[in-house]
Amino acid sequence: MYQSPAGRLCSALRDVPALCASSLRQQPHHSPVRRRALSPPVLGSLAGFGCCHSLAGWIGDGPAKAASNPGTSPPPVPAGGAAGSPARSVCSMGNSTSRLYSALAKTLSSTAAISQHQDYLDESEHEQLDPLDPKDLLEECQVALRERPARLHREFVSRTDDFRSPHTFRVMQWNILAQALGEGKDNFIKCPVEALNWEERKYLILEEILLYRPDVLCLQEVDHYFDTFQPILSRLGYQCTFLAKPWSPCLDVEHNNGPDGCAFFFLQDRFQLVSSAKFRLSARTLKTNQVAIAEVLQCKETGKLLCFAVTHLKARSGWERFRLAQGSDLLRNLESVTQGAKIPLVVCGDFNAEPTEEVYKRFASSSLNLNSAYKVLSDDGETEPPYTTWKIRPTGESCHTLDYIWYSQHALKVNSALRLLTEEQIGPNRLPSFIYPSDHLSLVCDFSFNIDSDRLL
């Protein structure tokens, strides 16, 4: 077996507590969870995380049926499942994982004391975990991906100006593609099935995050939060927050890993949490299936406050007015969180909207004084990239600009932005692929405060 600093990392993971217990929390109130003990891991083998380790089981068909009627709330489901309905078994996609993840699957002797509505892990649980070295973890990812083609290089484009603040912070926005949707529903006809195998795709996702080491990370379509991202990223120094969609389409896929949702992470050595809010977005008076997280953080270097938000608006053409209503609702909530734009704001998300849509125009003209960070890549500084997602489905090729990082343009400035992959780099089969794990490209920007930013808000 390969022994390296990353190999020693796996040995250190033997003492990890039962992190999978966290998978039993934060479930929608209408979806009781069937709990079961987990088998102990087998270190040094590929037979680690087996089925049903991240969410022990979703009972009944309530979430799936409700998804077809987003204007109503699903009825509560009794613990034994709906009458006449078989229990829905929830399993991780795939039957085995690498030694890195097998080490995270410690035996749960009892789960009776764990609340399924617990929002955060106790501080004592965080303190029991040894930190991970990001360089070692990156090496572990690269070893696991050694049979895959070399990944593509992306460069940062920097703005040239007279003032350069020493207090910069990096933000990453990424729709990572829910595993259940990638394998079960999205039907990427040019992507080999093997490229979507979670046992390797998770390493591609982690590698991308580790390459850019963001201070703030915003993800959408996260359906492996409790068994992968929260355990790993918390040990890299991130504080983690997750909010699942009430009726996630992942639950309609056999052998799913639970609902997908938005996830927010920030490095605790750079920021400290001041307040946190979670929203289920509304379209006029109707609660919808889309969500958002907003957290106010204080920069430990400067003492300045910043608000960060992550969201994922409704997909598909024909829903433009729906997205506009959702975006307007989010702006109203952010107006309150930022105390009327007194706190600088960064909003990351997959808006599922081209720059020509009204929801984009609403964000660009709101009282929060927002601008889109990726305009800095254009020659005129006013044009969005030609695409942030590029895929091929049975209905044809889809190439669109849907993902954005909005920021308070009077208080903050964009110092640099990560270039998108070119058409040649992406290749004729588009995304996802053996070299890129998602159908959306990650966006990464470095920000700093403007001089007298408080006055300019």
Image (tube, rainbow, N blue to C red):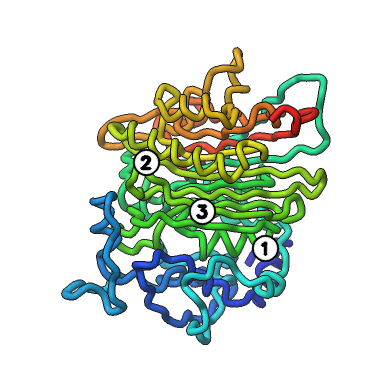
Secondary structure beneath label 1: helix
The reply, left or right, for residue 405 in relation to residue 210 is: left
Contact flag, marks 3 and 2 (Cβ < 8 Å): no
Name the amino acid, label 3.
Answer: Lys
What residue type is disc 1 on? Arg
Q: Residues within 10 Å of mark 1 (few under 14, many from 20)?
A: some
Q: Residue furthest bottom?
A: 109
Q: Name the spot of residue 35 as percent of width and height, x first.
A: 41, 79
Which labelled disc corresponds to residue 278?
Answer: 3
Q: Earlier in the sequence, mark 3 or mark 2?
A: 3
Label 3 crowding class (10 Å Cα cut-off): few <14, some 14-19, many 20+?
Answer: some
Nearest the viewer among 338 and 298 is: 338
Taking the view exactly as shown, the residue that stands out farthest to the left is 84
On the image, the x and y values in percent for residue 445 come to: 65, 34
Q: Residue at x 51, y 53 (%)?
A: 278
Residue under circle 2?
A: 314
Distance Cα–Cα, label 3 vs label 1: 24 Å
SS state under label 3:
strand
Q: Nearer the viewer, mark 2 or mark 1?
A: 2
- In depth, the one of 348 and 48 nearer the eye is 348
Q: Is residue 350 visible to us here?
A: yes
Q: Which mark is residue 235?
A: 1
- Decide: is 300 above or below 228: above
